[in-house]
Amino acid sequence: MATPKNLPKGLIISSEAQYLLHTMNQKFEELKVLIRQEAPIPARDYYTATEVCKKLSISRSKFEQMKRDGVFNTVKPSGTGKVLVPAEELSKLFPNTFNAQ
């Protein structure tokens, strides 16, 4: 088993330590993959602008343009600072992406 690349040259470590480092590196790589995977966004009454952008694979500026063009309505509850889009509108416009429940 090879010594991990990020250890100092000339460092001698036991085969058990090499195995542990190798296993930890594998688990770390698996964890990075899991973190990158997007958790599904459950259906509900409203979606945030960020969630809409993710589900439609569009930029925030494209979202703002669609909002200005009247493609969908938004609400901004006072004190939250969040822009919300009614799920009912999104399910009508994008039925394959936003399923109404």
Image: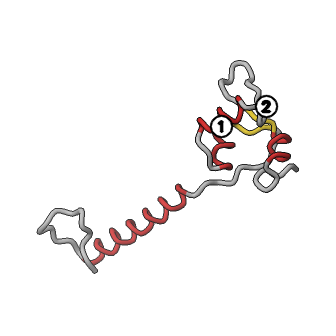
Q: Position of residue 24 (x, y in %)?
A: 39, 66
Return the mark for residue 80.
Answer: none
Q: Please state which of residues 69 and 3 is positioned toward the viewer in this rendering.
A: 69
Q: Position of residue 63 (x, y in %)?
A: 65, 37
Find residue 71 and report its image quarter: top right
Query: In the rendered image of this protein, does residue 18 appear above or below residue 81?
Result: below
In three-dimensional space, the C-alpha distance between marks 1 and 2, rounded to whole angstroms, equals 11 Å
- Amino acid carrying label 2: it is Asn
The furthest residue to the bottom: 1
Q: Position of residue 7 (x, y in %)?
A: 21, 63
Decide which of tag 1 and tag 2 comes sooner along the chain: 1
The residue that mark 2 highlights is 73
Q: SS at mark 2?
A: loop
State which quarter of the image contains the N terminus: bottom left
Q: Position of residue 33 (x, y in %)?
A: 50, 62
The residue that mark 1 highlights is 63
10 Å crowding of disc 1: few (<14), some (14-19), many (20+) = some
Relative placement, left or right, of 99 versus 2 is right
- Amino acid carrying label 1: it is Phe
**Residue at the image point whose x is 33% and y is 75% from the top:** 19
Q: SS at mark 1?
A: helix
10 Å crowding of disc 2: few (<14), some (14-19), many (20+) = some
**Callouts 1 and 2 close, C-beta under 8 Å:** no
**Residue at the image point whose x is 74% and y is 39% from the top:** 47
Relative placement, left or right, of 10 versus 96 is left
> Which coloring applies here?
secondary structure
Query: In the rendered image of this protein, does residue 97 appear above or below residue 24?
Result: above
